[in-house]
Amino acid sequence: MAAAAAAGATPATARKALLTTTATLLSSSLARSRRSLSCSAAAASAAPRIAPQPPDLLRWVQREGGFVHPALRVVDHPEHGLGVSAAAAEGDIPAGDVLIALPGRLPLRLRRPAGAADAVLVQLADQIPEELWAMRLGLRLLQERAKSDSFWWPYIANLPETFTVPIFFPGEDIKNLQYAPLLHQVNKRCRFLLEFEKEVKHKLGTVPLEDHPFCGQDVNSSSLGWAMSAASTRAFRLHGEIPMLLPLIDMCNHSFNPNARIVQEGNVDSPDMSVIAETRIDQNAAVTLNYGCYPNDFFLLDYGFVITSNPYDQVELSYDGTLLDASSMAAGVSSPNFSAPAKWQQNILSQLNLYGEGAILKVSIGGPDIVDGRLLAALRVIIAADLDAVSGHDLKTLMSLKEKAPLGPAVEASALRTVLALCTFALQHFHTKIMEDEAILKGEPPITTELAVQFRLQKKLLLLDVIQNLSRRIKMLSLDKSTV
């Protein structure tokens, strides 16, 4: 204090100077121990990785006690893109071989707080709704990305710098999707990121630097979007639906007919994971896993790709009495009464969860069932308008397209023609024609435009496939009727 007084400083200003110096030193220390969280928009071509020259991921997995089959390489496959493939020079891989094995410490997941910074992270994660679980895991990933000495840096350095999920699309390409259900989800996620950014900034603004989960760095909607996308495109929900990132395993691409599968061992606290060859894997073939039997909405929103001729793709509709009346009349069905069903019909619609309080009105066309079972049963019941005829069948029968005309050929034909009209109305909601979409794709547009156009094109082709399928069924009904 004597030295401070001699220099003309009061005790209060000396304390202030000391605190400022301490904060500066702490900030400098954090700056040296962190990596930048800056992010880019969706890439126009193949996305670069976080680090220009990332560490060898296979060697890191092996060094940390994991196993990698000697024939595996990370390469840019012409069909599947960057991922794990069998090397050309190593020969085929027999079915049953272990391809990758990860010890329990390699998966990255949310953990129990081990300090003040972890506690802050958990508090932020608790504010995220369950449906956006990827953002919770993304916060953990972002925490490790910020550290210069992260154990997982060899993994994180190999992650893409950008992702092709719709939240990073330019505004014009979001419009190019032309599909209201997906547009709703994209807008919902974008709004969430903007609101969550405010919550994060508010929370971190009250946290001392030494307790900052991101080493004092600013976290914005862009870095949050990167983290959420990294988690959604790469995480596996294993061991009781707990999401985790599995280094190297998450570089296996998707196929509905995979040549490998994941085997879970250990427990939640020490999740040992292996990838086993399901079939023989030829030289140069990509190692593939089945991410799930989902429509393209899911794959584009969470993974950033679209599957052509996806057998599980669907077009989402709303069970709306006015729309169904209009569709039935367009199909030539006399006196439809979807808007005003009889009491006994209301009871059946309630059992289908299409009527009354809490009804779930979302139905679909496409997928393995071709027509949503609840929608089909409702059409049959309303068009039949015959309680005695309907009472002779259970809901399972009424919901199945495999059941051949349970209420008679006339009712069945009218129900299917109503679905045809619904398909026609759905096609009219798209602003472009199929030929226009195909012409755009031939012009090699930017990747985000390509994905948006391919997505809507697949919806249109699906509707045409359903129209052709149901038209054949209607024709068979008329043939059957004529032979009676």
Image: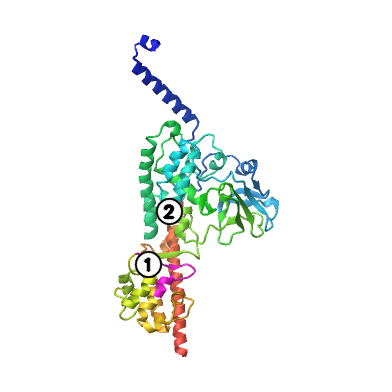
Among all residues in the image, which is located at the extreme top? 6
Q: Amino acid at mark 2?
A: Glu
Q: Amino acid at mark 1?
A: Ala
Q: Is 140 situated above or below 17?
A: below
Horizontally, residue 249 falls left or right of residue 302, namely: right
Residue 1, how many percent across, how many down? 39, 13
User: Label 2: which residue?
Assistant: 131
> 60 and 213: which one is in front?
213
Residue 444, how many percent across, how many down? 47, 54
Of pointers 1 and 2, the one earlier in the residue sequence: 2
Horizontally, residue 252 falls left or right of residue 455, namely: right
Q: Secondary structure at mark 1?
A: helix
Whether residue 44 is visible, yes or no, is: no
Seen at 43% across and 58% down, the residue is: 453
> 155 and 104: which one is in front?
104
Q: Residues within 10 Å of mark 2 (few under 14, many from 20)?
A: few
Q: Is residue 362 magenta?
A: yes
Boundaries of the magenta span: 358-377
